[in-house]
Amino acid sequence: MTAPEPSRTYDAVIVGGGHNGLVAAAYLARAGRSVLVLERLDHTGGAAVSTRPFPGVDARLSRYSYLVSLLPRKIVRDLGLDVRLRTRTISSYTPAERDGRPTGLLVGGGERRTREAFARLTGSDREYLAWQRFYDMTGRVARRVFPTLTEPLPTREELRRTVGDEEAWRTLFEEPIGVAVEEHFTDDLVRGVVLTDALIGTFADAHDPSLKQNRCFLYHVIGGGTGAWDVPVGGMGALTDALADAARAAGAVIATGHEAVRIATDGRTAEVTHRTADGEGVTATRHVLVNASPQELAALTGDTPPPPAEGAQLKVNMLLERLPGLRDTSVDPREAFAGTFHIAEGYGQLGAAYAQAASGELPAEPPSEIYCHSLTDPTILGPDLAARGYQTLTLFGLHAPARLFARDNDAVREELLKATLARLDAHLAEPIADCLATDADGRPCIEARTPLDLERDLGLPGGNIFHRDLSWPHAQEGTGRWGVETRHPGVLLCGAGAVRGGGVSGVPGHNAAMAVLEAGEG
């Protein structure tokens, strides 16, 4: 734990040592500003960390955030980060049963294999050709929109002109994404695979008039200008460790075990009160960058908090002695689990699960998706585990809103986990429980986290992984030039709840740093 110098005034104090705060710290320190990062936990990284969750087992898992798509290469280059991202060779596999026999849809491994997989599932090339046209459209949007994320916010009309495709604009920005899914595709399974990108961490129906599902979909298909979701070599903690190293190397002071409890500002300077095990301290600064939720920002400044946020996911980490076989014997499990393995995510199943959860019931068929980090990056396993063929599995369950866990978090967590694994087992040649490794105490290597767990452990409001509903990547009333400004001059929001926040991107951290540097003070 590094302590700030008690009498020093810093050019910038950053509240929260998650990845966005570290990005901001590194940029500002490299620009010659004096920077202090206050982190309440005993480590940096926030939700983007790697840990060994199972006692006595040498497996370092990305415990919360787990894939990277939205991190601009610009940030990696600017900060000189030693970070490697690996592309998954398979995009996804979705098991199904047709005419009483197990089958599925494998996307990836080359155009020919993907076309053949569509034809085998659906009986013709129609769905594959529709898939190509649809994702050619999203690809064009991605190449045009993604570079704008690290620029001052465009107006809605400026972004519309940048997109330069009225059909694409209508599809993604104006009509519920369910309209496009139903217009382009006819097969229920294919429709569901497309829709899942609109529902990650977002509790919504395909036709929700708020279009929050569209915003979620947009961020999931524009990353890197391609929409590809890559595996961070060494786990997610390798990325945030590299960011912390870059910030320290540039001169930033990172004080773990320091919880910010109050921000007082007169519009020109600010004081940040922080608490440690030894008591309270106060640090003066010119700028405060809050790498926390909008709710936490309001608590720190004494403002009225925004409406409550709600997360809607079940996160499960597993370590296996071996990958399970599949009922669909035409697919190698090493390919099926290398990409995103969709479970109970047909279009009708997703709609039914949403309706059940919205009415206060656990979904009868909980939708989820799984991937195996260690197939693409075995470095997260100790040499002995890797040699013995152990593998990790990360499961992300959809349509599990925080409200469902309010009556008894522990009991509902276990009930939902059991139902979710049962849906997975329906497509396996052996139960997943038979493949689980055991820890030093003989317990199965599996852990599950609900939205309420994430709120408790990480301070995520309602367990919402985006801090609040994702925003459109253009200016709206009161968003400011960079989308990080608050009503307090000199106090900026650089967490996931900023405009263009969400995901492991570093974008809000970059944009808050640019706002400070543009101010030209300090």
Image (spheres, helix red, strand yellow):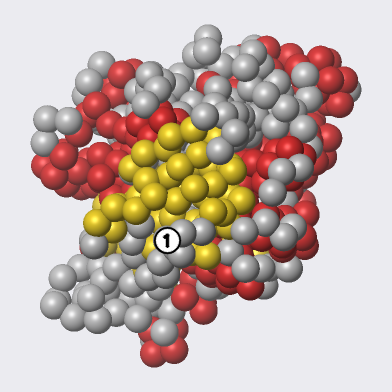
Q: Secondary structure at mark 1?
A: loop
Farthest residue, direction front: 7
Question: Is any part of residue 183 visible from this angle?
Answer: no
**Is 432 left, or right, of 230 in this rendering?**
left
Residue 353 sits in which quadrant?
A: top left
Question: x%, y% of residue 164?
Answer: 88, 22
Q: Which of 374/95 is in front?
A: 374
Question: x%, y% of residue 287?
Answer: 58, 42
Q: Which of 43/158 is in front?
A: 43
- Residue on which the image places disc 1: 6
Question: Is any part of residue 38 visible from this angle?
Answer: yes
**Is 127 left, or right, of 62 in this rendering?**
right
**Vertical arrangement, residue 101 with respect to residue 408, above or below:** below
**Vertical arrangement, residue 112 with respect to residue 277, above or below:** above
Q: Which of 438/267 is in front?
A: 267
Can you say which quadrant of the picture contains the N terminus? bottom left
Q: Residue at x 64, y 13 (%)?
A: 477
Q: Are there few (<14), some (14-19), or many (20+) residues within 10 Å of tag 1?
A: few
Question: x%, y% of residue 430?
Answer: 29, 62
Question: x%, y% of residue 190?
Answer: 58, 33
Q: Residue at x 52, y 13 (%)?
A: 210
Q: Residue at x 29, y 68 (%)?
A: 53
How many labels, in total? 1
Q: Residue at x 49, y 33 (%)?
A: 265
**Is 74 left, or right, of 301 in this rendering?**
right
Q: Amino acid at mark 1?
A: Pro
